[in-house]
Image (spheres, rainbow, N blue to C red):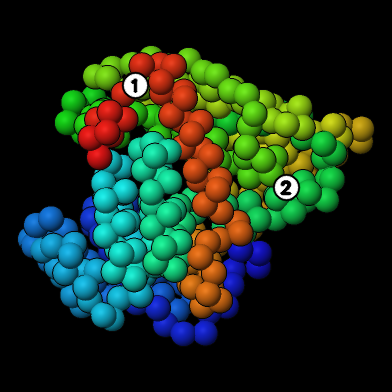
């Protein structure tokens, strides 16, 4: 099945910052091809021990330094809040560890550039955890679009909003740790459009409503070098179905829950034919991303061809400019990294 790869050895993973995301991803390691979580580290030993006990993980560390100094760990998965991705990734890479960093890659392009430079200097693998790209349905979708199934792409319209009660210290609403819905959720439809157009947008603008110094409801429009466009909404105070529709010159493709897709519908304009294609998978689908990381490491590659570092950096530049336009400023933007 597309998105799956074969890995020859067992790779030992360490989790840096166990919490909500790590709890979602952990079960899918058992579905991966050779991935085993050996250790986890938090800023408090109690939290690390609770996490490792819950998931049957062998080692718990109170400090991140202890995790990266563990000689048995091959790959670090960083799931700390956005503002700490830069510091945590560099710590791991300077100790020779390969890194999968949770999205968004960083809080701004400057931090992303430093992370990429560190990976290259230390000859280690680095990738943003844009797991959506690796699931079978999206891999198949990409191939069919490239083969001209719906002709040339003209428009992509997506939504990715959720309803989260406001709390000023919650990471989504806290500018001190890189909050805001653009970085938290908007990165999904932004990256999805870029993946299908096989390019970064050349023009973009958007509107945002702010609260507590961060964006809580956004509408962004992108124009790509081909002339194709994309628009998306994302929000923290209004739920949406997380769907995407791709409009081409010959047909359209509807994708329910595009970020975790298991199916899509192809609609041909001329014949009016509608066809559902389904690509079920076990678990939540993180195993395909995990496999990609291990395959790249095994092959000695510093980055993934499916989620290259240049794209992650490009999206950070775009989000930097949108935030600047909206007046969303993080301490890191003022040099307080």
Residue at 55%, 26% (x, y): give it: 232
Q: Is residue 203 above or below residue 245?
A: above
Position in image of residue 307 (x %, y %) = 56, 54
Badge number at residue 276: 2
Q: Is residue 257 above or below residue 2?
A: above
Horizontal arrangement in the rendering, residue 20 relative to residue 258 (left or right)? left
For marks 1 and 2, give the one nearer the viewer.
1
Position in image of residue 202 (x %, y %) = 64, 29
What residue does disc 1 label? 328
Q: Is residue 114 above or below residue 95?
A: above
Q: Count residues near mark 2 (Cα–Cα under 10 Å), then give few for <14, some for 14-19, many for 20+.
A: few
Residue at 67%, 40% (x, y): give it: 199
Horizontal arrangement in the rendering, residue 283 relative to residue 277 (left or right)? left
Q: CA distance from mark 1 to mark 2?
A: 41 Å
In what quadrant of the picture does the N terminus appear?
A: bottom right
Horizontal arrangement in the rendering, residue 267 relative to residue 182 (left or right)? right
Count of marks, rendered view = 2
Q: Quadrant of residue 71?
A: bottom left
Position in image of residue 153 (x %, y %) = 77, 35
Residue at 47%, 25% (x, y): give it: 321
Residue in the foreground of this view, choosing between 186 and 127? 127
First in sequence: mark 1 vs mark 2: 2
Residue 291 visible in image? no
């Amino acid at each position: 099945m597309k998105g799956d790869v074969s890995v020859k050895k067992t790779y030992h993973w360490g989790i840096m910052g166990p919490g909500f995301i790590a709890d979602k991803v952990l079960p899918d390691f058992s579905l991966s091809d050779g991935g085993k979580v050996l250790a986890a580290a938090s800023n408090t030993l109690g939290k690390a021990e609770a996490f490792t006990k819950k998931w049957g993980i062998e080692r718990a560390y109170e400090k991140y330094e202890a995790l990266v100094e563990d000689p048995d760990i091959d790959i670090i998965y960083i799931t700390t809040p956005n503002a700490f991705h830069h510091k945590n990734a560099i710590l791991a890479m300077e100790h020779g560890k390969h890194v999968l960093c949770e999205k968004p890659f960083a809080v701004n392009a400057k931090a992303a550039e430093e992370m990429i430079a560190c990976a290259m200097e230390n000859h280690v693998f680095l990738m943003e955890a844009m797991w959506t790209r690796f699931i079978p349905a999206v891999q198949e979708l990409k191939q069919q679009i490239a083969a001209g199934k719906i002709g040339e792409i003209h428009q992509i319209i997506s939504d990715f909003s959720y309803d989260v009660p406001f709390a000023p210290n919650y990471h989504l609403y806290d500018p001190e740790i890189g909050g805001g819905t653009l970085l938290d959720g908007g990165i999904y439809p932004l990256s999805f459009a870029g993946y299908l157009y096989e390019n970064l947008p050349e023009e973009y603008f958007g509107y945002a409503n702010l609260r507590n110094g961060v964006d809580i409801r956004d509408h962004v429009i992108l124009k790509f070098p081909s002339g194709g466009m994309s628009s998306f909404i994302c929000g923290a105070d209004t739920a949406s179905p997380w769907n995407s529709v791709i409009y081409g010159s010959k047909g359209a493709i509807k994708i329910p829950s595009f970020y975790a897709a298991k199916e899509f519908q192809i609609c041909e304009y001329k014949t009016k034919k509608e066809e559902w294609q389904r690509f079920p998978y076990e678990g939540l689908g993180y195993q395909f991303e995990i496999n990609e990381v291990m395959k790249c490491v095994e092959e000695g590659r510093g980055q993934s061809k499916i989620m290259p570092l240049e794209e992650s950096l490009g999206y950070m530049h775009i989000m930097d400019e949108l935030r600047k336009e909206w007046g969303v400023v993080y301490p890191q933007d003022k040099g307080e990294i």
